[in-house]
Image: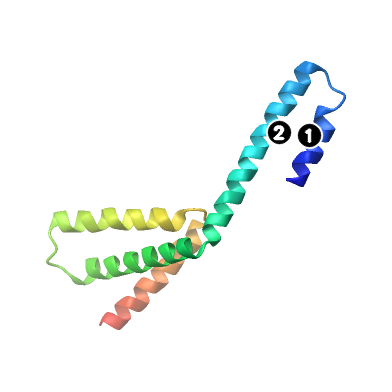
Amino acid sequence: MENLHKLKEIYLNDVDTELYEENLEQITEWEKKLIESENMLSWLAHDTTIEIKKKAKESFVSMAVTLSVNRELTEAQRLSIYAKQDGCLWILSLGESNSDEIIQGINRDINIALQNNV
């Protein structure tokens, strides 16, 4: 936020009215994005969020094991599980920049769960 104050000082002093309005609009937009980013980081670091993401990963792995070992599932049951897995992936992807790491971690957990299930 300190940098935004410096930006305002630099870009809003000694400029004409039109440029002032343009610069103020851009700085306001940057400020909104910064606040959103800070809020997201705070939310991601919260204990409850961490626990929700942990449960989503566990649920995804459990459903993957069910899909792989239970051949008696109906089409409707499989589609329901796929939809739930999509929801889990959405939760896991919130605030993450590297989807590959998430998928690789889930894949490792699924392989471990399958090996323990045999």
Please say whether residue 32 is visible from this viewpoint.
yes
Q: Can you identify the residue that label 2 sits on?
A: 27
Q: Could you tell me if the residues under marks 2 and 1 are in contact, i.e. CB atoms within 8 Å?
A: yes
Residue 17 in the image: x percent, y percent? 78, 17
| Amino acid type shown at disc 1 | Lys
Q: At 72% from the left edge and 23% from the top edge, which residue is drawn?
A: 22
Up the image or down, 42 lies above or below 109; here it is: above
Q: Residue at x 77, y 22 (%)?
A: 20
Question: Looking at the image, which is closer to me, 51 or 109?
Answer: 51
Residue 61 occupies quadrant: bottom left
- Does residue 72 lie above or below 34 as drawn? below
Residue designated by label 1: 8
Q: Residue at x 67, y 39 (%)?
A: 31
In-front residue for pair 80/28:
28
Type of amino acid at the residue the image marks with label 2: Ile
- The residue closer to the viewer here, 97 or 36, is 36
> Measured from the top left, where is residue 37 in percent x and y?
60, 48
